[in-house]
Image (spheres, grey):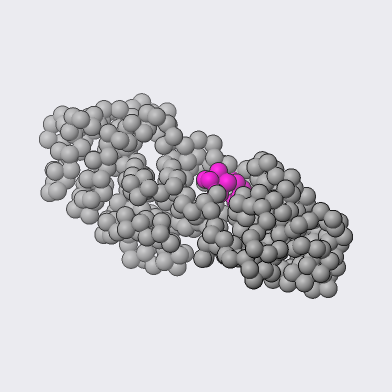
């Protein structure tokens, strides 16, 4: 092929653990058929990609039982694929997936046996599609084509509900935006008060079958006095002061907001104000195939999608360090989410209103998790602005 990539040309994809490098070019170039070359080890991913493509309106064909090792065996399989596809071109061979040997073998064999084959590589680092077999084709900038649903489905997750899609939630978030920003701005100064507020809110909410107990003990000191004055402003409708050490939560939702969900609001507002393409809070998910080996993550606190990249934000207002096992579980969950629900295109972030212990910071760094606590929460906004640009 010369000049420009052919929209509509059939794609031949080598399936690997990461589905987006095969999915993005298909969504951009709209091939009439997508041929999936699948090894036994990538059978689950092949079925998943096939299902996604079919749901997007593509015709697909699976070429299963491909060898992943042994150049001669892979070349033989590639020759068999070429025989089956003869006369169905033009083709674009996407070599981003599969093993290096598979990419080498298919690149050697298909252009020899099939007329009009171009070879494509999805360069996610530089955000372009590279057409390797045609010197006249300039790199094609990658378009923003992956929705949150497609991102999640690529890694075996289904979205069941989203809190921030609810009109009542949006109206409440808008009303509470000034307070949300105030709490985040002063988190370092009111860290102790946040702990007391968490405790009061937890007592008010109780366990699943407990009645809501609106009236609770809550004392404020230092900067916490200013925080309590801010929280009890009548325009927010969250809490009233009954006495110097007693407050009354206006509702169950008010207690939940003050007990920690304000941090999710904050992360969501930073994303929205930065004009991230997609920002969602309270995303309920399940494993698509009912995988009993992995517990479902249940809910993603805050999720952003921008230029096909995923940001997974875990928000915490409770103190770390009181329960080492629970602290480790939080880090494990976030690392697992980044690996299972984000892959190469995802990045996990921990947002905490309380200071992280040095040991926990070191562990987060070892897990390659980005973290923000009350000592550097102000840096979260420029972090998002930088993430959008790169």
Query: Depth check: 328 or 334 in front?
Result: 334
Q: Residue furthest bottom?
A: 71
Q: Using the rendered image of the protein, determine whether residue 209 is visible from the camera's viewpoint.
A: yes
Q: Is residue 58 above or below residue 3?
A: above
Horizontal side, residue 218 vs residue 282: left or right: left
Residue 305 at what x, y percent from top left? 47, 49
Span shown in magenta: 146-157
Magenta stretch contains residue 149: yes
Quadrant position of the C terminus in the picture = bottom left
- In the picture, residue 256 is in which quadrant? top left
Residue 69 x/y as whole percent: 77, 70
Residue at point 52% right, 45% down?
A: 148
* Magenta residue check for 267: no
Q: Depth check: 382 or 3 in front?
A: 3
State which quarter of the image contains the N terminus: bottom right
Q: In this view of the protein, which residue sits in the foreground, 50 or 182?
A: 50
**Residue 170 location, x and y as percent?**
36, 33
Q: Name the quadrant containing residue 239.
A: top left
Residue drawn 33% across the image and 66% down it: 358
The residue at the far front in this view is: 3
Q: Which residue: 39% across, 29% down?
A: 167
Count of numbered circles in the view:
0
């Amino acid at each position: 092929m010369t000049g420009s990539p052919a929209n509509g040309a059939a794609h031949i994809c080598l399936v690997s653990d990461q589905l987006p490098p095969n999915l993005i070019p298909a969504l951009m170039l709209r091939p009439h058929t997508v041929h999936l070359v699948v090894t036994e080890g990538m059978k689950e991913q092949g079925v998943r990609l096939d299902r996604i493509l079919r749901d997007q309106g593509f015709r697909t064909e699976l070429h299963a039982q491909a060898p992943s090792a042994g150049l001669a065996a892979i070349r033989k399989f590639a020759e068999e694929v070429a025989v089956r596809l003869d006369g169905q071109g033009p083709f674009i061979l996407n070599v981003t997936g599969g093993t290096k040997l598979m990419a080498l073998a298919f690149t050697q064999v298909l252009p020899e046996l099939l007329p009009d084959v171009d070879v494509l590589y999805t360069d996610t680092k530089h955000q372009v599609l590279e057409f390797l077999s045609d010197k006249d084709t300039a790199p094609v900038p990658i378009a923003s084509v992956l929705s949150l649903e497609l991102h999640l489905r690529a890694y075996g997750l289904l979205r069941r509900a989203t809190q921030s899609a609810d009109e009542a939630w949006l109206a409440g978030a808008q009303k509470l935006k000034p307070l949300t920003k105030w709490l985040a701005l002063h988190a370092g100064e009111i860290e102790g008060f946040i702990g007391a507020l968490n405790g009061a809110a937890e007592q008010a909410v109780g366990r699943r079958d407990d009645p809501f107990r609106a009236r609770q003990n809550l004392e404020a000191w230092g900067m916490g006095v200013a925080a309590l004055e801010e929280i009890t402003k009548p325009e927010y409708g969250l809490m009233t002061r009954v006495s110097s050490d007693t407050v009354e939560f206006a509702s169950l939702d008010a207690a939940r907001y003050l007990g920690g969900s304000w941090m999710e609001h904050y992360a969501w507002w930073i994303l929205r104000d930065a004009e991230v393409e997609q920002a969602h809070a309270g995303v309920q998910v399940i494993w698509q195939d009912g995988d009993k080996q992995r517990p479902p993550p249940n809910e993603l606190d805050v999720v952003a999608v921008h230029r096909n990249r995923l940001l997974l934000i875990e928000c915490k207002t409770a103190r770390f360090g009181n329960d080492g096992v629970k602290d480790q579980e939080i880090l494990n969950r976030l690392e697992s989410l980044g690996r299972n629900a984000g892959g190469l295109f995802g990045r996990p972030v921990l947002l905490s209103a309380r200071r992280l212990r040095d040991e926990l910071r070191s562990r987060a760094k070892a897990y390659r998790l980005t973290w923000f606590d009350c000592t550097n929460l102000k840096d979260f906004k420029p972090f998002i602005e930088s993430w959008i640009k790169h």
